[in-house]
Amino acid sequence: MGVYLREKKLEGGQVSYYLDIYHNKSRWYEFLEIRINKAHPTAQDKEKKRLAQEIRSKRENRPLSYLTNECLLKAMTV
């Protein structure tokens, strides 16, 4: 299983973080709703990036059944 932290470029030099999760030829995404100003990062932006990396690490170490059930529930409520 692979859990990758990805960035989506937004207007004004901002980026939004999301997780790209891949296992057994299946891929799904978890949007973290964490945004930073990459053009002019502040100390708070650096802390947000560290938090996103910490979330990625925790997701990678969770059992796959937990991740699958969590993502399926999110998909059903959208």
Image (tube, helix red, strand yellow):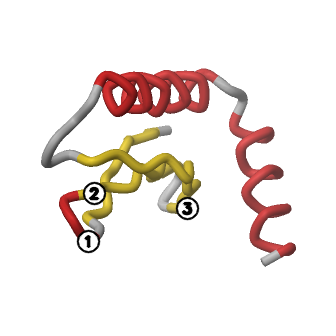
| Amino acid tagged 1 | Glu
| Other-residue count near label 1 (Cα within 10 Å), few / some / many at <14 / 14–19 / ≥20 | few
Q: Secondary structure at mark 2?
A: strand
Point out the tag, 1 or 3, that comes first from the N-terminus.
1
Residue 28: numbered disc: 3
| Other-residue count near label 2 (Cα within 10 Å), few / some / many at <14 / 14–19 / ≥20 | some
Q: Is residue 3 above or below residue 24?
A: above
Q: What separation in Å lies between label 2 and label 3 (alpha carbons)?
A: 23 Å
Residue 11: numbered disc: 1
In screen coordinates, is 22 left or right of 70?
left
Q: Is residue 61 above or below residue 19?
A: above
- Is residue 56 or residue 61 the one in the foreground? 56
For the C terminus, which image quadrant? bottom right
What's the residue at 55%, 56% (across, down)? Answer: 31
Choose mark 2 or mark 3, whichever is in front.
Answer: 2
What's the residue at 34%, 50% (across, down)? Answer: 6
Percent x, y for residue 55? 55, 29
Residue situated furthest left in the rendering = 39
| Amino acid tagged 2 | Gln
| Other-residue count near label 3 (Cα within 10 Å), few / some / many at <14 / 14–19 / ≥20 | some
Residue on which the image places disc 2: 14
Percent x, y for residue 69? 82, 51
Point out the tag, 2 or 3, that comes first from the N-terminus.
2
Q: What separation in Å lies between label 1 and label 3 (alpha carbons)?
A: 25 Å
What's the residue at 69%, 38% (across, down)? Answer: 64
Q: Secondary structure at mark 1?
A: helix
- Is residue 62 or residue 19 the one in the foreground? 19
Q: Secondary structure at mark 3?
A: strand
Proximity of marks 1 and 3: CB atoms separated by less than 8 Å: no
In screen coordinates, is 41 left or right of 35?
left
What's the residue at 19%, 59% (across, down)? Answer: 13
| Amino acid tagged 3 | Trp
